[in-house]
Image (cartoon, rainbow, N blue to C red):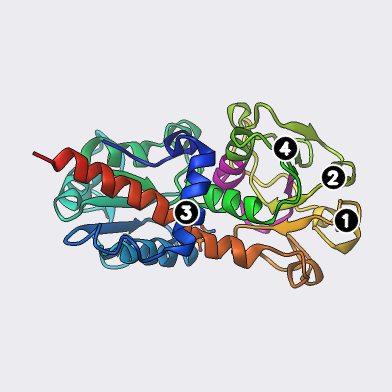
Amino acid sequence: MVHFTSVKDAGSLDKAVEEAFWIKKNRFADSDLGKNRTALLIFFNSSLRTRLSTQKAAENLGMKVIVLDVQQGAWNLETRKGVIMDGDKPEHLLEAIPVMGCYADIIGVRSFARFENKEDDYQEVILNQFIRYAGKPVISLEAATRHPLQSFADHITIEEFKTREKPRIVLTWAPHPRALPQAVPNSFAEWMIAAGYHVTITHPKGYELDEPFTRGAEIVYDQKEAFRGADFIYAKNWAAFRDPVYGKILNTDRSWMVDNNKMRLTDNAFFMHCLPVRRNMIVSDEVLDGPRSLVIPQAANREIAAQVVIKRILNEISKTERP
Ligand code: CP
């Protein structure tokens, strides 16, 4: 069974981008492919872009879509194994997942890192239970350690706007008042390195990401030095990864915000962020509203990325069902 949880599931990235460009011009060419099929999109966490773009992509392919917000209307789900269920959670994920699998042909799941147990987060306990028990293809709509549909959309966007074959991409940490997961930066770094770009990551000391995601990237602690000559600046906040401060905010140093002075150090770089973004915390208004900001094209490409992935899965389902 095919699932989509990381860059590894995308196969050849050149081919994936080529398919994306084709879909962008032929959005409704496969509107029968998903006929009589249902996509169930399950959200343990809030979403605007992922919810709308994935639903739109599935509908472009002729699918019916059910969206379930676990926190609003579903039974409160127990996720730990082996517990005595005498608390406020009347249903266990172990039953809920195969039940959900009965109603869907493809399941999308959003389940962020909880910062309660690093091992559980980094072993993707929730996502992997869906893969194990749903009996249906699973798409990550952002899990604890990766946000692959976002990274795919970011890749499509860079390919659309780049002016040199292997652009210089800088992923920069920026301040935020709340502790945020590492899924977007992990996934972005991993995907950009796999794409063969020159990748630099800059952050204050203590915010090092998990090394398997960043292997092949240059780490520079001086943000201004990192910005020099960049073609794309990708800003994101994340909480500390390393023990004993996993999931903690180490500082909210406002001097790390991306502003026009820093963007002037680059090679006329484009600015990117996955959204939602905190204005004048992560990035100044002038950069976000400026002519080099790509945040809206990135969001638009979420639909295209999702459509490539869902189309591939629907094709696989059709193949396995052939007599
Ligand atoms: N970028 C992104 O995943 O946005 P949402 O959290 O709104 O889905």
The C terminus: image quadrant: top left
Q: Residues within 10 Å of mark 1 (few under 14, many from 20)?
A: some
Amino acid at pointer 4: Val
Task: Mark 1 or mark 4: name the one nearer the start of the chain.
Answer: 4
Q: Are circles 2 and 4 on residues that touch, CB within 8 Å?
A: no
Distance (Cα) linking label 1 and label 3? 30 Å
- Over which residues does the magenta segment extend? 170-188
* Tag in front: 2 or 4: 4
Q: Which residue is mark 2?
A: 223
Q: Secondary structure at mark 4?
A: strand
Q: Which residue is mark 3?
A: 305
Amino acid at pointer 2: Gln
Q: Which residue is mark 1?
A: 262
**Relative to residue 178, is residue 247 depicted above or below?**
above
Across and down, in percent, residue 36 comes to 16, 61
Look at the image and say whether residue 128 sits in the magenta stretch: no
